[in-house]
Image (cartoon, helix red, strand yellow):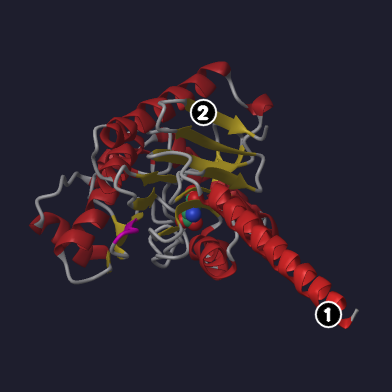
Amino acid sequence: MKKLLFLSILILSFLGCKNKEELNVQSNNEKETTEQKVNDFAIVIHGGAGTILKENMTPELEDAYKSKLEEAIKVGYEILKNGGSSLDAVQKTINVMEDSPLFNAGKGAVFTNAETNEHDASIMDGKTLKAGASAGTSNVRNPINLARAIMDHSPHVMLAGKGAETFAKEQGLDLVDPSYFYTERRFNALQKIKETEKVEMDHDDKQAFYDPFIKDSKYGTVGCVALDKNGNLTAGTSTGGMTNKRWGRIGDSPIIGAGNYANNATCAVSGTGWGEFFIRAMVAHDISALMEYKGLTLQEASKEVIQKKLTELGGDGGIVAVDKNGNMVAEFNTAGMYRATMNDKGELTIAIYKE
Ligand code: ASP
């Protein structure tokens, strides 16, 4: 009898172990499916977030934004499709948006209080964790090219002002007369803000992001993130900063970890929004850290940082991101964000408002 009891306990515990093993196998499989590559390569861009409402938009302006986004993302897509690096794809895609007056970067940069234009930009290579950033330059036509040159050809990560401009000259980058950056729309936005400042001492800080096209506040920074066929991630961001900025104000865009971050172990992130809050929340790095240390998916990590952390702090804006498996995300807490995605099948999505 005792022998029989012993034998049945042995059989039962053997079966138990087997079930547990099966369970382990199953949970590993589940992990594998969430970890699976969804795209061999992928690219996501943004052209700024803000109070972008359909009722304030004309169909012509909407078309202009959409076709520029499409033109820009296709440049990067072609590079990736032909086996090029995500670094080149990000840089060249951003160049298209920098050369357009529609966005607050390069040609369309906003004006400072002193009626000048001061550009900030950064790029980060997820493979080497190398990064380059430039801040407060006034004569470099494509600030993202300067950021790339700083990463590739200097021992530093960030250069600012006159020194950065000297380096740009030494590198043979395209320099322009500062008047190249003049656009009537941005100049009028500055005048409007200065007027309100005169009458309202306690003015709304969001005035600093006023955009006469959409008749409300908009952050017009441009950004691009990409994954290439070799599994390398890159993030790039370029901006004119904030209208009416003074005292050499620098935003989040050239701050690695705040407005830009890439790491092959996790993801690449580019942000747009109220820079001071993005710096304080370390938005871009936080998304990567949640994935790396807590195992969150890109979607979960982006939601957590944008909808909770940033929002609770009082900041607004958004990010675009792509992870090492080619998952793409656009997360924002504003009414809209100019954005576009392309996957390895060449499928394109372009959107402006919240769905
Ligand atoms: N983040 C930028 C800044 O604060 C502004 C923007 O996104 O347009 O400089």
Q: CA distance from mark 1 to mark 2?
A: 72 Å
Q: Where does the N terminus fall, quadrant-wise?
A: bottom right
For residue 259, say whether it is visible: yes
Residue 49 location in percent, x, y?
56, 43
Residue 61 colored magenta? Answer: no
Q: Please state if 245 lies on the left or on the right of 213 as rendered.
A: left
Residue at numbered disc 1: 3
Residue at numbered disc 2: 350
Q: Nearer the viewer, residue 314 or 203?
A: 314
Callout 2: SS: strand
Q: Main secondary structure of the magenta part?
A: strand
Residue 57 location in percent, x, y?
60, 25
Q: Amino acid at mark 1?
A: Lys
Quarter assignment of residue 205: bottom right
For the magenta stretch, what is the residue range? 123-127
Cβ atoms at labels 1 and 2 below 8 Å apart:
no
Q: Amino acid at mark 2?
A: Ile
Residue at (42% x, 61% y) in the render: 265
Which one is earlier in the sequence, the residue at label 1 or at label 2?
A: 1
Q: Nearer the viewer, residue 350 or 299?
A: 299
Residue 126 colored magenta? Answer: yes
Height in image: 64 above or below 298?
A: above
Q: Please state if 177 lies on the left or on the right of 351 as rendered.
A: left
Quarter assignment of residue 171: bottom left
